[in-house]
Image: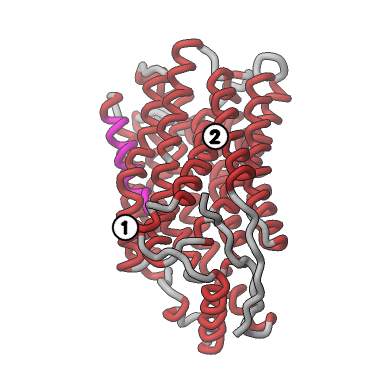
Amino acid sequence: MATLEVPQHAVPTAPANALDAAYSRITWRIIPFIFALWVLAWVDRVNVGFVKLTMLDELGWSEAVYGLGAGIFFLGYFFFEVPSNLLLQRIGAKKTIMRITIGWGIVCVATMFVKTPAMFYFLRFLMGVFEAGFYPGIILYLTYWYPSERRAKAFGIFMSASAIAGVIGGPLAGGIMNNMHGLNGWSGWQWVFLIEGIPSVLAGFVTWFYLTDRPEQAHWLTAEQRRLVHEDMARDNRALGHREESLIASLKDRRMWLLILIFFCIIAANSSLTFFGPSVVKEVGFTNPATVGWIMAASYLCGAVGMICNGLHSDRQQESRLHCAFAAALGAIGLALTALFMKQSPMIALAAQTLAIVGTMSAIPVFWQLPGRFLAGAAAAGGVALINSIANLAGFGAPSMMGAIKTSTGLLSPGLYIVAAVEVCAAILIIAFVPRFAKKAVTR
């Protein structure tokens, strides 16, 4: 097995205060905006987990139909992520993110008119097609703005938007479903798709005017700040040493496929929690959509804190391997405990599900430190997308499996045990096959 060994620490090329000020300005300019976009994306992606509480009965669909529809989103991801990320590298983030955001918003609104499973499957697939390039595109985009030792924190803040979306999306969907049902002759679940899709369309147009592709184009930075960031990024590239820049060559690297397998295991857990978390809450006795939303909001708030704290601690310790492995193991323990206590103690089951959300989501930001240790250029653009697209096939398989098991047995717990076992494999693979990173000081 080829190692992932690479320098992880380097001496900055400029005074710390000046660099910190430049990166602080970058953070305040970029992170809140892409954070807001990811909140919108996540809300539009997972609102089916909340509308299913009434949508399935109204349309006469089974849990298996829902599970397949929820998961088929990730097939669109699989086929279109790599092309989208390669296009982003060529035409820039601004054009790419604008197209993506407007597209998924339109599809979200259109989903309010579904009547048949086939139409549901098609629109969910189309949602995946449009959203495919967003997540890996932002990961690549942040590597243009931050050196490696600052990225885990940036990744953690950005990715915590998915947890914040859970905080916002649950109560919002529950409130809409309770208060707008029947208005204009539409069901509450239809209003959820309409109200949550329109802001994404509008945000897409804002992206064109607000986003900046590269630091050298950032006129909101001073000339001196642009110079310092340019020099610091060059220093970081030297510190990382030689990295593969050919996408084709990177496909032959066993490290790439190891990372795909690890992330596959993490995504299996994350997608199961995303699409069946509300169902767990309902199954332990909370049936009101608004109540379910608030319970999930509390869990995802804890998940957001976990993501940011784990990313920040990873940066400070200059270590990502164990931070990812331990978080994944924590998520697996939470899933197993959720399954164990669902029929015995609702409160313990809900606390365990929160633990699963915290652990699983906290593993994701620090995981994305790993590919950049040996990929650069086109290999980084395509490699990040490839890892995410293939691994997200777990997002198709896990919800489909959960839905099929629930339909055939009437229980969620067997599926949760299976997903817990899969996530344990992520921790084992990291500890067994991902070596510790070497540290090396690099000066100008």
Left or right of 440 on screen, residue 265:
left
Residue 269's label in the rendered image is: 2
15 is higher (above) or lower (below) than 271: below
Q: Position of residue 217 (x, y in %)?
A: 42, 79
Q: In the structure shown, which secondary structural element does the residue marked by tag 1 occupy? A: helix
Quarter the C terminus occupies: bottom right
Crowding at dot 1, Cα within 10 Å, few <14 / some 14-19 / many 20+, comes out as many
Quick one: label 2 or label 1, which is nearer the N terminus?
Answer: 1
Q: Amino acid at mark 2?
A: Ala
Residue 99's label in the rendered image is: 1
Viewer-proximal residue, 270 or 163?
A: 270
Task: Examine the rendering and report whether any part of residue 93 can be seen.
Answer: no
Q: Amino acid at mark 1?
A: Arg
Left or right of 24 on screen, residue 252:
left
Residue at (66% x, 75% y) in the render: 441
Q: In the structure shown, which secondary structural element does the residue marked by tag 2 occupy? A: helix
Residue 191 quadrant: top left
Viewer-proximal residue, 110 or 220?
A: 220
Residue 343 part of the magenta segment: no
191 is higher (above) or lower (below) than 66: below
Residue 244 quadrant: bottom left
Viewer-proximal residue, 379 or 293?
A: 379
Range covered by the magenta-colored residues: 119-133
Residue 130 part of the magenta segment: yes
Q: Give the colour scheme of this rendering.
A: secondary structure
Front disc: 2 or 1: 2
